[in-house]
Amino acid sequence: MAERIRMANDRIVEINSLVKRFGELTALDEVSFNVNKGEIFGLIGPNAAGKTTTLRILATLLLPTSGRVRIFGYDVVEEASKVRRLISYLAEDAGTYRNLAGYEYLSIVARIYFRSKRDIEEAVEEAVRISGLGDRIMDKMKTYSKGMKRRIQVARALMTRPKIAILDEPTAGLDVFHAQHVRDLIKRHISNGGSLILSSHNMLEVEHLCTRLAFIHKGRIITEGEPEEIKVMYGASNLEEAFLEVLKR
Amino acid sequence: MRGLRPLVEKEVKNLLRDPRIYIGLIIPIIMFPIIGFVISMTTSQAMEAAREKIKVTIIDEDGTEASERFISLLSDSGLNVTVSAKSLDEAIKSADKLGSKALLVIHRGFEESLKRFGRVNIEIYSVIRSVGFKSMGVQAAVSNVLKRTSEILSSTLISRVAPDVDPEVLRNPLNVTEYSVVKGKIVHAPSGSIFGQLMIGHGVLVPMILFVLSMTVTQIAATATAVENEEKTLETLLTFPVSRYDILLAKLLGSSVVAALGGVIFAAGFVLYFQTCFSGIGLEFGVGGLLTELPPPPSLSYAILIVSLILAILFVTSLGVVIGALSSDVRIASSLLSVITIPVLLPSLLIVYGSVDSLPLALRILVYAMPTSYPMIMAKEIILTPMPMQVIYGIPYSAALTLIVLYAASKILTPEKLLTLQYKIKLRRMKKERRWELE
């Protein structure tokens, strides 16, 4: 595996000419972009632009109609089980198990990912800390608010120390404090050597968080680059303006 | 397989803490003894009522010494007799007022007929005030008193004609003693009792456990799997580094652990039901009592019965897991359950009510194709054939079929295929609902 990782060099996600059709609907049309090691890559676009479909394909949940998607050199279709060991995925509407306590859930997930008792304990400890739920971590998750459920899911996604975390709208539905907390966690994941790809509607959030991003609209990548680069390219003061400018052109 | 254990733990904890599951498991333990208690209580009431002095009103149209002696015989036999000299209609009204349970009419010519050794006519009008075990018991008691009195009269008449003859011998010249021969051993019981005991001991208990547990566990498994879809936890689960097969196997094992608990509770409830239901009725031998006279089957036979029963339940549960996986929500899973599980369980009923060998070939193949048939065959044959070969072969077959079902399901457990299948099921359901609305 190490060899494959070295082969992939810094380019950890490679998407080439990705097409996804649901019957007559083309959700993704010749999508291509790369994600490099240590990056926070943002996939930005309005509703039904194709963000979630792209992330689901990366997470091995959906199959591409055509095109190639590789993570650390592994094909997401042919080598899906190897890809799953390297990633963690947070769905936009990820649910929780009503009758499990937050702590139990984290501990079960840790036991799926790690073998040694020490690794498991460390992962759970880290997750409990980053969830910021305090004593409520021992309560059943059916008693959690929407924000608490999201925080436990973010903690779950990051505790496994994934090579790349795939987060679909990680701050969706969170208030300003909790959204900031999640953004801090994302930054810490990168400083610990991880990489991350996320989707968002919130362009201002992405502007401050992502190292590189791509605008996606109607299943097509319409521009890609660093936030500053894109703003300069379209003479915009922020990403929202840049996005609207791209659409006009 | 690394992820299997935590996944099973997740299933068991999540299921056991679900109050809906608890209700499903606890109901049998409460329900069966209650049913048993109600049956026992009503039967006791009927017997109690039969023991009390029952009020009857009598119209003695004959008014002779013989009819008076007959009335005193009835009184000695436990009836509280009131003699009425009124017409039938008035006597009925008076019987009702007095609280009599029956009105007896001794017609004119009673003594004359007896003297001529002819039959005498007695009319009985049962006064029914309520419908229930107690009323039934009272009416049965009145009939019994009349029957006993008739025997006394018959004995008196026989003794008058033939003083040296035992009236009982004349009434029943054949003295039949019934025995049954089972596996070369003579059992002091009529064959009917043996069949009855076999039916209750094994032919009812095993199918009851199989049907109730299968339906309960399949419901649990289907719900547990469909809930993953409904509450949006399946997507996350499918990105974990565990195989789809392990995810489904964990569902099956988790539901089975809950089922095992349910099985113990159910069996306890069932035993309590039999105890409460039959204690007090005076069932001489008790359930399975006669069977103790037979050479007991080897313990290996019971082991085979239990294994085949567990495998049958696991098989039906695996179908529940598949149904749950194909359903986008619990409602769809519930409606699909009966469509799938009842046809799977039905062929095994053919074994309870008939012989497999006498079935047409197609039905015989169907019976042997269903793992649910093997515990039924075993339960039926255990006393007479301790090791039926078809059951021995059925054990690896049932285990393999269960794993194949799970394996096949794991192949479709990808959101891609699930979404397509769920969409088709939903579409079909919507079309059906629209057709109903139009009709």
Image (cartoon, rainbow, N blue to C red):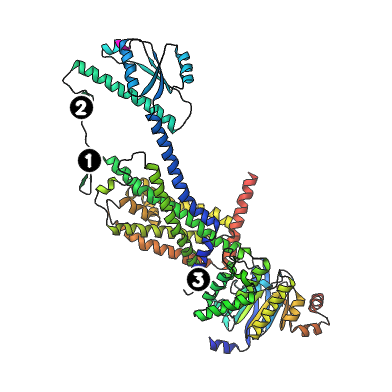
Q: Measured along the vertical axis of the image, is residue A231 above or below residue A103?
A: below
Question: Residue B6 got which mark?
Answer: 3
Q: Measured along the vertical axis of the image, is residue A86 above or below residue B436?
A: below
The reply to whether callout 2 and callout 1 are in contact (CB within 8 Å) is: no
Is A55 inside the magenta-drawn segment?
no
Question: x%, y% of residue B89?
Answer: 47, 14
Quadrant location of the C terminus of chain B in the rendered image:
top right
Is B109 inside the magenta-drawn segment?
yes
Cα distance in 3D space between marks 1 and 3 = 58 Å
From the viewer's side, name the closer residue of B301 and B147.
B147
The reply to whether callout 2 and callout 3 are in contact (CB within 8 Å) is: no
Q: What stretch of residues is rendered in magenta?
A: B107-111
Residue for point 43% across, 65% down: B403
Of the two numbered discs 2 and 1 on the same chain, state the one appearing first in sequence: 2
Mark 2 — residue?
Answer: B173
Name the secondary structure under disc 3.
helix
Q: Is residue B318 left or right of residue A6?
A: left
Name the secondary structure under disc 2.
loop
Mark 1 — residue?
Answer: B179
